[in-house]
Image (spheres, rainbow, N blue to C red):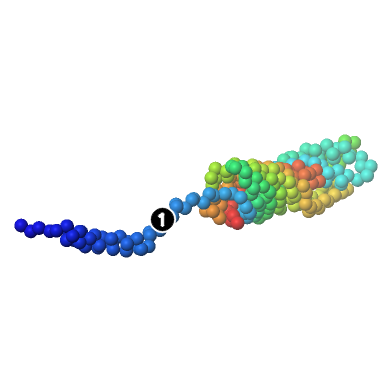
Amino acid sequence: MACFSRPRLSLALAALALPATTFMTQAADLPRRPPEPPPALPVMFTWAGFYAGIHAAYGWGQFNREQFDQTLVAGAIPANYAYADIVRQYAASLPGTYDSHQWGGGFFAGYNFVAGNLVFGPELDYTAFFGKFGASTICFYPDPNRGITLPGAPTQSLIVGAETVSKVTDYGLVKARLGYAYDRFLPYAFVGIGGARFVAQGTGSIEQYTTATGIVTGSATNSINKNQTTLAYGGGAGIDYAITDQIMLRAQYDYVQLDSVVGQDTKIQVGKIGAGIRF
């Protein structure tokens, strides 16, 4: 049986402990593993800032020409004309309101301010129509084949006529928008004021002739040619949708009233579909 003295036992334990101490010292000198970075916070989408885009448009509207035709014919009545009242009576027998529609296109640009879910700001919107957005008519009162038999002159007849063109070529509005954002959806409403270019051309005519032969015994005409910018104002609604942080789509409806041009009362409605870039 082997026996160990206490000094030898202490030396043996010390020899066993030395490698463990060395390992712990070396482990303490090793570089520590860096801590995991915190998760990145998601970037919140916002409608704030500048934007601009283009749109296609389809317009439809009513052109009230009653006063225009009457103005044309009234201007053709000669001074002290014996049948002036009859001319005015038949000039009032015009068709009145004409409907029209036309395609167009344009652009828009604006700036959005944001307060919570509310989005508001100014916008400039311009639309031009590709063809004639209006009405062209030739009207005779009554039927040009029979005329008006004049009282006190049974051999004489009268024709009253008006040939007219009315059209809107383009319009632009400075608008104030207010919307409520549902993340990337932005429904909005707006009011606006601006101008529209309006063309009003026409000729009113009075022709007196011998009923039996058709020989003209007297005639008079009056012409008006206006190509002017008139006041336009109205409102509407729409919706923007941001398909990316920079690109958005738009659908919009405009209702626009034009100030009177030569007695013509004109209201137009325009539907628009567009796309834009946010800066």
Q: Would you call the spot at circle 1 few (<14 residues within 10 Å), some (14-19), or many (20 or more)?
A: few
Q: Amino acid at mark 1?
A: Pro
Instruction: Give the quadrant of the C terminus.
Output: bottom right
Q: Is residue 86 above or below residue 242?
A: above
In the image: residue 18, left or right of residue 140: left
Q: Which residue occupies the extreme right position in the image?
A: 80
Instruction: Give the quadrant of the N terminus.
Output: bottom left
Residue named by callout 1 = 35
The part of the image, by quadrant, that contains residue 142 is: top right
Q: What's the residue at 43%, 55% (across, down)?
A: 37
How many tags in the picture? Answer: 1
Q: Residue 130 location in percent, x, y? A: 65, 55
Q: Residue 40 location in percent, x, y? A: 47, 53
Q: What's the residue at 54%, 49% (across, down)?
A: 45
Q: What's the residue at 66%, 52% (across, down)?
A: 110
Q: What's the residue at 63%, 54% (across, down)?
A: 50
The front one of 102 and 146 is: 102
What secondary structure is found at the residue carrying circle 1? loop
Q: Residue 91 location in percent, x, y? A: 81, 40
Q: Is residue 8 visible?
A: yes
Q: Residue 168 location in percent, x, y? A: 72, 50
Q: Is residue 223 above or below residue 86?
A: below
